[in-house]
Image (spheres, rainbow, N blue to C red):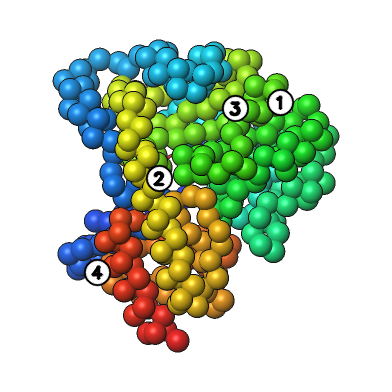
Amino acid sequence: MSTPIRPNVLNMTPYVPGRPIDEVKQELGLDRVIKLASNENPFGPSPKAVEALKQAVGDLHLYPDGATAALKKALSAKFDIGEESLVLGNGSDELIHLLGLVFLGHPSDEVIVGEPSFIRYDASAELAACHLVRVPLDRDLAYDLKAFSDAVTDHTRLVFLANPNNPTGGIVGRTDLAHFLKDLPRAVTLVLDEAYYEFAADDPEYPSSLEFIREGYNVIGLRTFSKAYGLAGIRLGYGFASPRVADAFNRAREPFNVNSLAQIAGIAALSDDEHVRTTVQMNSEERRRMAEQLTGHGARVFPSWGNFLFADFGRPSKPIYEALLAQGVIVRPGSAFGKPSFLRISIGTPEENTAFVTALDRAVTAVV
Ligand SMILES: *Cc1c(COP(=O)(O)O)cnc(C)c1O
């Protein structure tokens, strides 16, 4: 007999990422493939980060700084928060895993997530073999914070809220969030996943997790270098928490969970405001254009504060997804989020977006 595997692990579904460019090229024999499926920065990483990495590769025989001191110092200065409130991870995905390890342990513990929202939250509850409570978004695909409040019980430990939400792109405003937090029992921690923070930060109604952490609420903010900073491949995420929670993360994490290249690239990228600013500006112009084009092709497009759009075609989107793929354009099918009539489309460079629109034109005429 083999060693038994925990049933909660066997019940987990492996994550299905956006299709890699090379795989699609090979499979379909295409020369040019455009990936608008994983909300990456289409303009690439900060040139400052690239330069710093070139200097750093000769030191790869050495272990990374396990305390990530220099990166913490840079983050602390940028966000005006004490280093004892910072947590760092191998992408914010790792921090989401750690949240389960740090907060969940009893089978009766409950975790609340929006539906649809970022799929990786489920894993933190599933690994801990505790209850995952899904609260559907409202008819306009906005978070229903009243329903979230109603779902909280004495067993609730974590509430995950992506702001902006992925895949829908919507945000929860400051007033609504403050109201929700006032009623939240002290034993519950609200995780504000701000992976798309930089894209939404210009909106005066958009709150930062830091505001609530400074006021002493049980809030953890998660950020990443994978989206606006263009460093998805290097795996670097960070978070803001109370010193007590940050200390718990520090105990539970692997000793070298942030590799040396990630630390060096992160510091350089943080100093490159220009790269983030042009990324965000291009994104908002192109997002407007893409929304118009999608609407013109019969889709209902939901307002987005991120670098992607969630579009409802009002009929199964799989044939459209496949017709786009056949033309070398990878998007994300809505079925991945339980919304089979939707596509999630990342905003690319102007050229990529134009190629998407051309392909969409053919895709929708081919399938109707
Ligand atoms: C992309 C994304 C992440 C993951 O970021 P990594 O730092 O690459 O692990 C986390 N949350 C949301 C909502 C995302 O869309």
Dot 3 beta carbon under 8 Å from ligand 1: no
Give the mark nearer the N terminus: 3 vs 2: 3
Q: Tell me the crowding category of disc 4: few under 14, some 14 to 19, or many 20 or more residues within 10 angstroms, Cα based.
A: few
Residue 69 in view: yes
Q: Nearer the viewer, residue 117 or 100?
A: 117
Give the mark nearer the N terminus: 3 vs 4: 4
Q: Nearer the viewer, residue 75 or 63?
A: 75
- Find disc 2 in the rendering and name its residue: 280
Q: Residue at the location (53% across, 66% down)?
A: 301
- Find disc 1 in the rendering and name its residue: 217
- Mark 2, mark 4: which one is toward the viewer? 2
- Find disc 3 in the rendering and name its residue: 210
- Find disc 4 in the rendering and name its residue: 28
The quadrant of the picture occupied by the C terminus is: bottom left
Q: Position of residue 312 (x, y in %)?
A: 54, 70
Q: How far is mark 2 from mark 4, CA to CA?
A: 33 Å
Residues tagged 1 and 3 counted as in contact (Cβ below 8 A): no
Q: Position of residue 365 (x, y in %)?
A: 39, 84
Q: Tell me the crowding category of disc 2: few under 14, some 14 to 19, or many 20 or more residues within 10 angstroms, Cα based.
A: many
Name the kind of residue labelled 3 in the image: Leu
Name the kind of residue labelled 2 in the image: Val
